[in-house]
C-alpha cells in the first residue's frame, strides 16, 4: 500500500516481534529519508516538511517521523484466521482501487501464491 504495510510474520525463538518491528521501522525510515535527501524531486521539500512536522509532535523523535508509533498485532492461532488475514491483505489494494485483482499489485504476496513474477520472497512455513 502507499501509506502502510501489512505483514504476517513471526519471530524466531529467542527474538521478540516488537524488537523486529522496531528495527524494521528504524532501518526503513533511515533509508527512506536518506533517499529523499539525496535525490532532487519536485515534492522533496514538501514531503520533508510534513515528516518534520509529524516528528515535532513526537518526543521520541529527533527530527522526522516516517512510521506511526503504534502497531496493531493480531495473534494468528488457526488456519482459518490465517486465511482470513491473508485474504484481507491481498484484497487491500483492490479495495483501495489500485488494481482489479490482488495479483496485479506488484508488491503483494498474492503474486507469489499465483506463481506470477514478484519483487519479494515469502516463506510458506505456516
Image (spheres, rainbow, N blue to C red):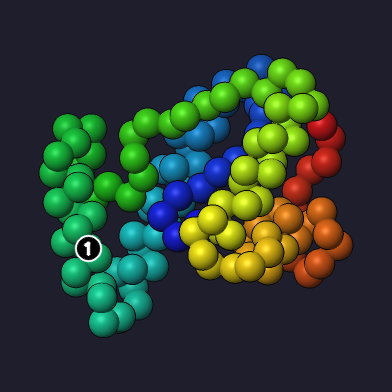
Residue 123: which quarter of the image? top right
Q: Position of residue 37 (x, y in %)?
A: 29, 69
Q: Is residue 54 left or right of residue 106?
A: left
Element on which disc 1 rests: helix
Residue at point 65%, 36% (across, down)? 85
Q: Residues within 10 Å of mark 1 (few under 14, many from 20)?
A: some
Report which residue position mark 1 lands on.
Answer: 48
Q: Is residue 46 above or below residue 23?
A: below
Report the label total.
1
Q: Position of residue 56 (x, y in %)?
A: 13, 44
**Is 94 in front, or is 35?**
94
Residue 106 in view? no
Residue at point 19%, 58% (across, down)? 50
Q: Is residue 72 left or right of residue 48?
A: right
Residue at point 37%, 31% (across, down)? 70
Residue 55 in view? yes
Q: Position of residue 48 (x, y in %)?
A: 22, 63
Q: Position of residue 73 (x, y in %)?
A: 52, 26
Q: Is residue 22 above or below residue 90?
A: above
Residue 61: which quarter of the image? top left
Q: Is residue 74 left or right of residue 119?
A: left
Residue 78: which quarter of the image? top right
Q: Is residue 117 above or below residue 28?
A: below
Q: Quadrant of the C terminus?
A: top right
Q: Is residue 53 left or right of residue 101?
A: left
**Is 117 in front, or is 101?**
101
Residue at point 41%, 55% (across, down)? 3
Amino acid at each position: 500500500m502507499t501509506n502502510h504495510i501489512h505483514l504476517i510474520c513471526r519471530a524466531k525463538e529467542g527474538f521478540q516481534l516488537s524488537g523486529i518491528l522496531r528495527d524494521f521501522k528504524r532501518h526503513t525510515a533511515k533509508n527512506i529519508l536518506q533517499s529523499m535527501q539525496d535525490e532532487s524531486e519536485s515534492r522533496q521539500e514538501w514531503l520533508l516538511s510534513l515528516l518534520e512536522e509529524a516528528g515535532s509532535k513526537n518526543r521520541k523523535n529527533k527530527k522526522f517521523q516516517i512510521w506511526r508509533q503504534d502497531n496493531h498485532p493480531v495473534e494468528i492461532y488457526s488456519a482459518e484466521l490465517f486465511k482470513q488475514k491473508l485474504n484481507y491483505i491481498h484484497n487491500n489494494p483492490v479495495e483501495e482501487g489500485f488494481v482489479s485483482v490482488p495479483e496485479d499489485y506488484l508488491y503483494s504476496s498474492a503474486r507469489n501464491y499465483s506463481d506470477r513474477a514478484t519483487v519479494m520472497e515469502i516463506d510458506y512455513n505456516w
